[in-house]
Image: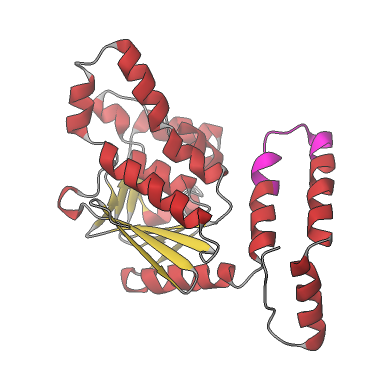
Amino acid sequence: MEFETILYEVKEQVATITLNLPESRNPLTEQLVAELMQAIKTADADNGVHVMIVTGAGKAFSAGGNLNEFKQNMEKDVPQLYVEGKESTELFKLGATVKTPIIAAVNGAALGGGTGLVAMCHIAIASSEAKLGLTELRLGIVPFVILPWVRQAVGNRRVLEMMLKAEILSAEQAAEYNLVHEVVPPEQLEEKAWETAKTIASHSPLAVNLALDAYFTTEDMDFMKSFDYLTNLRLVSFKSDDLKEGASAFLEKRPPVWKGK
């Protein structure tokens, strides 16, 4: 598989996806977004991949939307903008539909859409040099597409503040806001992301898939109905080969050998 704007590597059950337009701080161009979607879907369909890591080449994670493409949008008619707008949301739907966890290794600035991408990832680890923020209002636009993910991460009042102030947050502030889970020195970022990925990859892939399903499906479900749905998922878990293997391995004091079924 060949890409022009990202790098894709699979090693030890971990797919590393690197946004690779460092000269322009890895903007979310149409081509990069399309390739990123393809890479995520490819990794998710690969039974040999149990975790993904998304990071950026160079000094930035992602500077967000591409201003040159924004300017071109001004010349398009409403029907075309509507179709393209719906397509632009497909990347950010993936976080709630994949069966494979995604870790963001935030190596530098992650602004606008870059912040949205961080919020979409299931776990986010940031370098102490990272900067995050919803800076769109500075340019006269609104973070429409990424709003649901950032709202989920930080809460209603905080996301409103972030949008209206359009300020840039330090990594430590982003952690206080729950945009990222952990902040580490820059030289430790890759190691920490890899360590986290290997921990997740050591679990049953079926159980991890069920965990993501349980979380996202019941997120906005009626409270009482969520118990019924989770009971059904529990049946899948209890009849799985992986649960039998996990119990046997624990009792026999040996590492489990997962089948993913």
Q: Could you say which is closer to the camera, residue 258 or residue 252?
A: 258
- Identity of the residue drawn at 52% across and 42% down: 154
Q: Is residue 213 above or below residue 77?
A: below
Q: Is residue 119 left or right of residue 220?
A: left
Displayed quadrant of residue 90:
top left
Q: Position of residue 84 (x, y in %)?
A: 34, 24
Residue at 45%, 39% (x, y): give it: 92
Residue 2, placed above or below residue 70: below
Report the side of 261 relative to 107 (left or right): right
Mark yes or no: residue 111 visible: no
Is residue 122 visible in the rendered structure shown here?
Answer: yes
Q: Main secondary structure of the magenta part?
A: helix
Q: Residue visible at 45% across and 53% down?
A: 42
Location of the N terminus by quadrant is bottom left
Indicate the position of residue 146 as horizontal and vertical percent values: 43, 35
The residue furthest front is: 1
Can you say which quadrant of the picture contains the C terminus?
bottom right
Q: How many marks?
A: 0
State the extent of the magenta-drawn residues as a range. Answer: 214-226
Of 184 and 234, the residue lying toward us: 234
- How far across and how far down the image is residue 210, in percent? 69, 54
Where residue 46 appears, as percent x and y from the top left, is: 51, 59
In the image as oriented, which residue stretches furthest toward the top? Answer: 78
Task: Find out whether residue 242 is within the magenta segment.
Answer: no
Q: Quadrant of residue 105?
A: bottom left
Q: Going 79% across and 55% down the picture, which residue do you hit?
A: 236
- Hey, which residue is sitting farthest bottom in the picture? 253
Q: Which is more toward the observer, 226 or 155?
A: 226
